[in-house]
Amino acid sequence: MIYGLGRQLSRVTLLGLPEAEIYRQERLYRRSAARGGGIRSGLLHCPVCGGRATRYRPFGLANRPNSACPYCGSVERHRFLWLYLRERTSLLRQRLRVLHVAPEPCLERRLRALPNLRYLSVDQFNPGADRRADLTRLPFAAAQFDLVLCSHVLEHIPDDAAAMAELSRVLKPGGTAVVLVPYDPKRPETEEGRDVTSPAERWRRFGHPYHYRIYGADLPARLSAAGLTAMVVATRAMLSGHHRRKYRINRNYLLHCRSSSREKMDRRSSGSGMRGTPTGSVR
């Protein structure tokens, strides 16, 4: 997650700047606003940090109103993801090896503080990540992690099938991946643009200069092709209207993905899925 991309949007689209040039700027990974910023305590409750506020700050390229927690910086998808992990997974109860792809600071702080987790973050550009790597070629042996978190990353990758395959490869048999992407279940198929090289054209088509697609109803099938059985979870199915208002969570979706134990055992016995250097312990 980066901050301040909107201030560079005109420059990015006009000059066609590549993603690496922008995403390697260390300052974009730091929030500049003071904690709270003068916003009073109120009815809005952030489940990530526990802060309460009368309103949230705008966020995103379109300056989406009432979105970002003034205390921890979480936006709607982060609050949804944390609630899901807390209430619908064993994150707080079991000893787990966790891989966090493109770590969001608000969630990273919470996850690193949990004594039952062996936590590792990975990002292609973020200098603060534990490991720097391309998601299409992770430097981990197969079946290393119990849980992989990957939020709003796959849409940035031209070959998302290779990235999905890597998420599946590094999961232990029966492991879980939680995936969030720009997703519209009313679209029969993903609007694909992996060959679009212009940031201006990607901004026009996908609402972001570095996105290559908007996923449609075929997303579970795309994940299944990579060895991940996916279940779509909607905010409106999980949370009541009262709780969506309280936590300020919009209409959103995540994919709860499980790896196939049989496929993983076949891959490990054949060695066909191995890439990178075996790591043993993740920390």
Image (tube, rainbow, N blue to C red):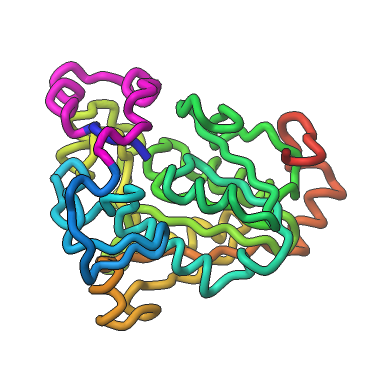
Q: Nearer the viewer, residue 266 or 27?
A: 27
Say which of 164 and 245 sits in front.
Answer: 245
Q: Is residue 140 left or right of residue 129?
A: right
The range drawn in magenta is 6-34
Q: Magenta span has 25?
A: yes
Give me the residue at 47% from left, 38% from top.
159
Q: Main secondary structure of the magenta part?
A: helix
Residue shown at 57% from the left, 39% from the top: 121
Q: Compared to 34, does 38 lie above or below?
A: below
Up-down: is 244 above or below 20? below
Q: Is residue 66 above or below residue 195?
A: below
Residue furthest to the right: 269
Residue at horizontal 38 percent and vertical 38 percent from the top: 156
Q: Residue at x 34, y 52 (%)?
A: 74
Q: Quadrant of residue 283?
A: top right
Locate residue 266, reporting x and y percent. 81, 55
On the image, the x and y values in percent for residue 237 come to: 36, 80
